[in-house]
């Protein structure tokens, strides 16, 4: 349980750091472009990359948390 809380806090801190421009663009720009190219969707512009990273991180958090909840109550 503590690992899940640490994971959630870490992801939210990364989102806050990206929005506050504390993490350089070059660290996550090519990663997000590669992810979008891999799954075949339109790559975001440079101005959109901050919010795209935040949306991906929050979506990932929601998916992981819901999977853990389902595993806890179904199995």
Image (spheres, rainbow, N blue to C red):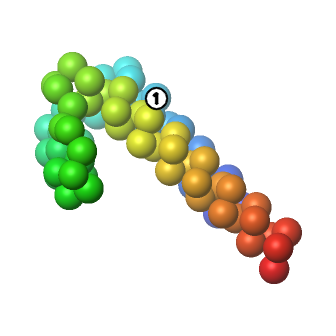
| Residue projecting furthest to the bottom | 75
Along the line of sight, which residue is nearer the eye, 28 or 3?
Answer: 28
Residue drawn at 45 percent across, 43 percent down: 57
Q: Position of residue 21 (x, y in %)?
A: 30, 23
Where 14 sits versus 5, above or below? above
Q: Position of residue 58 (x, y in %)?
A: 52, 40
- Left or right? Give the position of 69 relative to 32: right
Residue labelled with disc 1: 16
Residue drawn at 26 percent across, 56 percent down: 39
- Which quadrant of the rendered structure holds the C terminus? bottom right
Along the line of sight, which residue is nearer the eye, 1 or 57?
Answer: 57
- Which quadrant of the rendered structure holds the N terminus? bottom right
Could you tell me which secondary element the residue under label 1 belongs to? helix
Q: Position of residue 45 (x, y in %)?
A: 17, 26
Along the line of sight, which residue is nearer the eye, 72 or 37?
Answer: 37
Q: Is residue 59 visible?
A: yes
Along the line of sight, which residue is nearer the eye, 2 or 46?
Answer: 46
């Amino acid at each position: 349980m503590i690992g899940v809380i640490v994971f959630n806090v870490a992801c939210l801190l990364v989102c806050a750091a990206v929005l506050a421009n504390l993490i350089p663009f070059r660290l996550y720009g090519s990663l997000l472009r590669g992810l979008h190219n891999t799954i075949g969707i339109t790559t975001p512009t440079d101005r959109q990359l901050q919010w795209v990273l935040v949306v991906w991180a929050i979506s990932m958090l929601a998916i992981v948390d819901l999977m853990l909840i389902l595993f806890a109550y179904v199995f």
